[in-house]
Amino acid sequence: MPPDSDLVTGDAVVLELQLARSASRAVAYGIDVLVQVVSLLLLAVIFAVAGVPDDTALLVTVITVVQLGVLVGYPAVCETLTRGRTLGKIACGLRVVRDDGGPIRFRHALVRALAGAFVDFGPFGAWSVVGFMASLVSRRSKRVGDVLAGTVVIRERVPSADPEGIAMPPALASWAGALDLAGLPDVLALRSRQYLGRYHELNAGARERVGGELAAQVAHRIGTPVPPGTPPWAYLSAVLAERQAREYARVSLAAPRRELGAPAAGWTAPEPDRRGAGGSERWPAPNAGSAQPGRPEPAPEPDRRHPESPGDTPFTPPN
């Protein structure tokens, strides 16, 4: 089964992970059902000890609330607090992420839980055939809840050849910190991630054409053109690494945002090209000479130099 290298974990770190298939998801679901049944039995014992109310309407209300809390509340709360995992998924090494690979939020978990309880599986798997059939026919093993929530379940315990994933090009680190990424859609971010993941599988012409098109679309969405002399893939890497760092900062207060933008395996820090005794660098950081730092620079002329030619650029192509 080929890895889906364009996905990331719930911690917003890019990994070569595989989609979870029906068998592993069924085991995880079975564990979750067992947890739910045990929870209901414990609650039943508590009610038996405390005494059953004589009011029939109140009794029906309490039973309905408890059932909804166990059927819907358990998966929704667990997946929100653990960023995509229930007890069953933890045991099986699975995690729910968004279609673009980012961590899910409460709305995603709630939609999955509601669809699971009333469409995919029913109360405690009463009509599980719907969810399992939808997962079997889906190319990405999605059940109805995943389709409605825009999520996918991945395996976390697959060895990764490149655990660091997309990293910030050092020459663009400070420049990327001022970007406004609110207008970047998930679909475009996913396409850019796929392009970087398959960079070396493309010929030189396709790299330049596809990379240029994606960079132009991203630049239009975020309102910041490609800095002069920057290859499209370096621009896309900087944007995605910064987006990844900000996403992580929102879901984990313990990790500094700038750490995730640091160079990782697969990137080589550029060696400055010194000129004579003055020692000026050939490739200054973007906006280094601008009178108004942080403002978008005019659209650059197309860079026709081959990005892999030694000494021709301070950027190292992605591995």
Image (cartoon, rainbow, N blue to C red):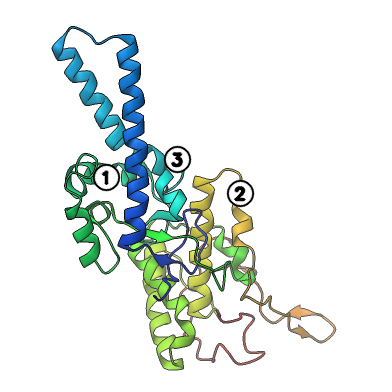
Is residue 234 something that shows in the picture?
Answer: yes
The residue at the point 46 percent across, 50 percent down is 91
Q: Position of residue 17 (x, y in %)?
A: 46, 67
Residue 103 or residue 245, whichever sits in front: 103
Give neighbour class at mark 1: few <14, some 14-19, many 20+ (Cα, 10 Å): many
User: For the residue marked with disc 1, what is the amino acid?
Assistant: Val
Q: Secondary structure at mark 1?
A: helix
Q: Which residue is mark 1?
A: 111
The image shows residue 302, relative to residue 247, as above or below, that is: below
Q: Which residue is mark 2?
A: 255
Give neighbour class at mark 3: few <14, some 14-19, many 20+ (Cα, 10 Å): some
User: For the residue marked with disc 3, what is the amino acid?
Assistant: Leu
Q: Nearer the viewer, mark 2 or mark 1?
A: 1
The residue at the point 26 percent across, 69 percent down is 139
Q: Secondary structure at mark 2?
A: loop
Decide which of tag 2 and tag 1 comes sooner along the chain.
1
The residue at the point 64 percent across, 63 percent down is 262
Q: Which residue is mark 3?
A: 81
Q: Position of residue 79 (x, y in %)?
A: 40, 44
Q: Nearer the viewer, mark 2 or mark 3?
A: 3
